[in-house]
Image (cartoon, helix red, strand yellow):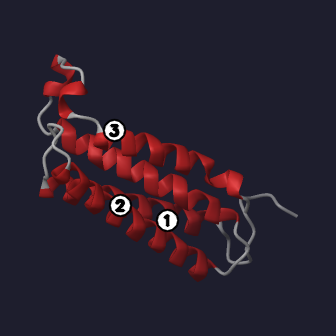
Amino acid sequence: MSLKSFLPGAAWFIISFFLLALPGDDFPHSSFFDIPFFDKYVHFTMFFLLTALFSFPFFYYNAAGNVIRGWFARVAALVILYGIAMEFVQRMLSNGRSFDVFDMVFDSIGSIAAFIAITVYYKNKIGPNRNRGRNQN
């Protein structure tokens, strides 16, 4: 596992930081964004991707399965804390963004969903004798 494997997660972290810190008036206004609770879907998706992208490099970490699942849990917890912190940042910045507890809830749900998905994927990908995939000699 190299630092390069974390580049997609780091890039998405930077993008999400700027999206969450942008003033509310800078977002384009379109009828597409009038979908009920569209903001919550965006929060869910952003934090799902952030957790998945930072968890994926641990697939190739040479350790026991429970250690790797522990890393998945740590990543999910840190992403949830990041979501909570960003809501407080939005509260402190007077840029047309507001503090919303439901944003934190959907950030957390997205991160937990990614944790579950990546854990299930990892469990199904790794065989009982640590073989990855099928047809390996």
- The numbered mark at residue 82 is 2
Closer to the eye: label 3 or 1: 3
Q: Determine the residue positioned at 19% across, 33% down.
A: 24
Question: First in sequence: mark 3 or mark 1?
Answer: 3
| Mark 1, secondary structure of its residue | helix
Q: How far apart are marks 2 and 3 (CA)?
A: 14 Å
Q: Identify the image quadrant of residue 131.
A: bottom right
Identify which amino acid the numbered label 3 is placed on: Leu
Location of mark 3 (residue):
19
| Residue 117 shows in the view | yes
Other-residue count near label 3 (Cα within 10 Å), few / some / many at <14 / 14–19 / ≥20: some
Residue 34 sits above or below residue 85 on the image: above
Q: Determine the residue positioned at 39% across, 52% down.
A: 48
* In the foreground, 16 or 51: 16
Residue 37 sits above or below residue 79 on the image: above
Left or right of residue 14: residue 35: left
Q: Distance between the residues labelled 3 and 1?
A: 30 Å
Instruction: Provide residue 40's location: percent of width, then percent of height.
Output: 20, 45
| Residue 106 shows in the view | no
Location of mark 1 (residue):
120
Instruction: Provide residue 85's location: percent of width, then percent of height.
Output: 29, 61
